[in-house]
Amino acid sequence: MKKFPFHRYRPYWLASILVPVLLFVLACGPGESPTPTPLATATSVPAATPTSAPLATATLTSPGPVATPTPTSVAAPIPTPTPGEQPKRGGTLNLVEGATPAHFDAYLGYSPGFQAFLGKQYSNLFINYVGEKVDCEICSEAGWRLEDGGKTMVFNIKPGIKFNTGKELTSADVAYSINMMMGNIDGIVSARVGWVKEYISSIETPGAYELRIKLVRPSAVVPKLLSTSFAIIVPQGTTRDDFKSGVTPKGSGPFILKQFIADASLTLERNPNYFKPGLPYLDKVVWTIAADTNTQWAAFYTHKQEYKFQMEEPVDQYLAQLFKLRDDGKIKYISIPGVAGYFGVWMVGSKPPFNDLRVRQAVNLGVDRVAFGQGTFGDRAVPQLLMFLSGEDYGTPADKIWNVVPGWGTGAKKQQELEQAKKLLADAGFPNGMDIAQFSSTATNVGYAAGSQLLQSQLKQVGIRTTLDIAKTGGTDFANRLAALDYLIQNYIFYRITGDPDEALGQYMITGASRNATGYSNKAVDKLYTLMSSETDPVKRKQLFFQAQDIILNDLWYAPAQNHNGYITFWPNLGGIDQIGLSPAFGSGTARGDRLWFK
Amino acid sequence: MRKYIARRLVLMVPTLFIFSLLVFGLLRVLPGDVAEKMLIDDSGAQTASKASLERLREKLGLNRPLYVQYLSWVGDTVRGDFGVSLLTGRSVIQDLKQRLPLTVQLALMSLIFSTCVGVPIGIISAVKQNSLLDYGLRFFSIFFLAAPGFWVALMVILAGAFWFGWVPTLGYNLLWQQPMANLSQLGVPALILGLSAMASKARYTRSSMLEVLREDYIRTARSKGLREQVVIVRHAMKNAMIPVLTVIGLQFGAIMGGSVILESIFGIPGMGTYLITAIRRSDYTVVQSVVVVFALMFMSTNLVIDLLYGWLDPRISYA
């Protein structure tokens, strides 16, 4: 065979090599800013009955009073920069998010990124900034007050606040917005804050700037609920069509949507007519979209975005590098109380075998809290009872949980608990253990899948052999089965929005509560909840909560497990990021972003 | 030839009809709908009342009988109206116009790259059979054939960020509006997407070339005293390219499909991202339309490839 004359085809070979090399070089070259495209415009406008004596339990109390919102005569808060640092105006805040919102309907939304986007374009009746009490955001100097023994909230709206359409914000807009949340406008109740309707009996607007909200009973949670970024104020007459993706939101917030490219980018610009003097500091907020978490963290690592909010740790690949940056003082972390995470193990106590308290006790004793926490959250695991982590206002101190609460034993004590669990099962008629189905969501967030498998392996230690019964979908099928109590046992996750005990009891534990997915019912808890919910004295309120918690922990339809804190990771050239609201994911103070500034 | 093209085009109609039925049916079999996705969160909390869900379903037209929904969609699609996204309310055709250029460009770039590199590698490997160069190129091909595109992509992003402070350009950048940003955004994913296509093309080209090079007519051509490059290029390569061409046609579909993952990783707002997002959100109208567009593109590409056979091999006729 003759030798092939490669040299004659040199241009072809060279081109084959040069084309990909050129592509690669270009790919690594500098990018250009995208050209804005025009925005779309709106076109229209059974009681728990223990069957055997419970194990020794402890009555848990918590030290210190709890801060509850109180009326104030002070208007919207003025920015309070950290001593020695003076906020500067200007700059563009660059962020990377996983997707552009499918719709701009804050009342129907539930994801943190979504609220961070919409929350910057609206105002709320109440706002919460870290270190400050929940307060009226749009009130005049006269502020707001309670009347009728705390059953009527009276607001004096500040005149001159304008929506970006030019229309003035009045009490009628606030009333309309709250009615929309409650489903009184079009029958669709807000997924997140719609439960405010349980507290509000009527809303009156005696004047353009006066608003009266009559409550069923005095409530500390209503201001918190209305301060979440789901409780935005929209102009009267707003319809769902105004919330379509790409339609400029008609808000009165610090920023206005200037450019929207689906799944590519979102650009907000300063609202020149924002009603808070001197705010916002930033000129612009730009989100670019990268669906992949790795890419999002790569963008943060290379300082292409200023901060990244994550309820969980960043993906493993970045941990070591981020810790190094943090240790070198190049980036900062702020720990956030457990917005999301494990509630613990849920059992449907009305169904066999969990209608026997001894079986529920065996489950509770069988869960190794140390291993469970380590396996799901590593070093970030924090003990928790009833959705409040140790260290939080309504949390139980860690030493009390580890040393007093049954099932939280460690070392030799845990071995004793496991033996005790086996004995309880034998007493309940299961000397050889049992085989049951263990329900699980398909959701992969907050360690759900890992938690399900850990629970399965731990229950096996005491003779409860489970088969994982996976919901068809993480959202719909899971929700439907929870609502129908169509399962026996599962580990449950939650997303907290107010951090108020009303949410913990009223949403999850009282008879018929909207998120009561175990069917738990105890008249004593219901009664304590009613008392607690209307109690305005923080100390008494806390005592009532802990009494209810003790009963729930004795009934054990729910066995608590460890949870975790989240983080905001940020580059230190960004000021004001530490002013995180009560609930970082959903607090309007965080979402608003009007106090963020570049150093 | 014209008759053949017309026949193939007519045959596309029943194929697309069956395809549309399948897509429509399969989507309805999946649990959940857009209304539930909008009102129920990841924690499975049934925060929305059944009345709220029904209201939303009614508003979105999901309460209509399935056959009405299907006929309505097909009727609109035939008229060139893909409807509006159930979730965003935006026109699907407008979204497709925005996204299609990026995905097609990505697919073409990776196809060009994989062909420009893969075919020469295959030819060199065949001509230099069992040499050190052949072994090296075969190792190279098999490596990229074995390495999953998404893994290579993640490695590129990690290495880029940690070692070079580089991240892919994000945002929406069209070639004719922001050429540098566009190439910066699509270059690396096109290379990665093209790697496994390149490797398989190299393998196909090599084996096809080896087969052809053993043919009698090649021996005849050499014995006639033709120069080796004439033998390789004019006689061997042209015939060896027929199976490779089939692979290119099939790869176009695979590359379009593969772009779904790479678009997500590299933040490219193309068809893949559109489809994935729509599937997650049970946005029926979008999923149906995108899948039909993908199917049309795949069928059209294969028609073009079939026509090219005739050009490469005069024995193939379409009379």
Image (cartoon, rainbow, N blue to C red):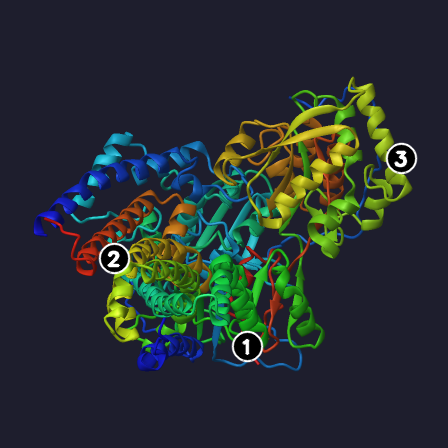
Work out which residue is located at the far front of the displayed protein and give it. B223
Q: Secondary structure at mark 3?
A: helix
Distance Cα–Cα, label 3 vs label 1: 53 Å
Read off the chain for label 1. B
Q: Is residue B117 visible?
A: yes
Crowding at dot 1, Cα within 10 Å, few <14 / some 14-19 / many 20+, comes out as: some
The relative height of residue A9 versus residue A434 in the rendered view (above or below) is below
Amino acid type, label 2? Gln
Q: Quadrant of the N terminus of chain A?
A: bottom left
User: How many C-alpha atoms fall within 10 Å of the one at disc 2: few (<14), some, or many (≥20)?
Assistant: few
The residue tagged with tag 1: helix, strand or loop?
loop
Distance in Å between CA atoms under marks 2 and 1: 36 Å
Q: Please tell me if label 2 and label 1 are on a single chain.
A: yes
Residue ID for mark 1: B165
- Residue A283 image point, x, y percent: 44, 76
Q: Are marks 3 and 1 in contact (CB under 8 Å)?
A: no
Neighbour class for label 3 at 10 Å: few (<14), some, many (≥20)? Answer: some
For image coordinates 73% across by 37% down, the residue present is A457
Q: Pointer 3: what residue?
A: A416
Residue lying furthest right: A412
Q: Position of residue A462 (x, y in %)?
A: 79, 31
User: Front-most of A376 and B246?
Assistant: B246
Task: Tell me if I can see residue A277 in this picture.
Answer: no
Quadrant into which the C terminus of chain A falls: bottom right
Circle 3: residue type: Gln
Q: Would you name the residue on which mark 2 appears? A: B94
Report how far apart the C-alphas of labels 2 and 3 lie in the structure. Answer: 66 Å
User: Of the residues under marks 2 and 1, which one precedes in the sequence?
Assistant: 2
Q: What SS does tag 2 mark? A: helix
Give how far across and how far down residue B62 sits, in percent: 32, 36
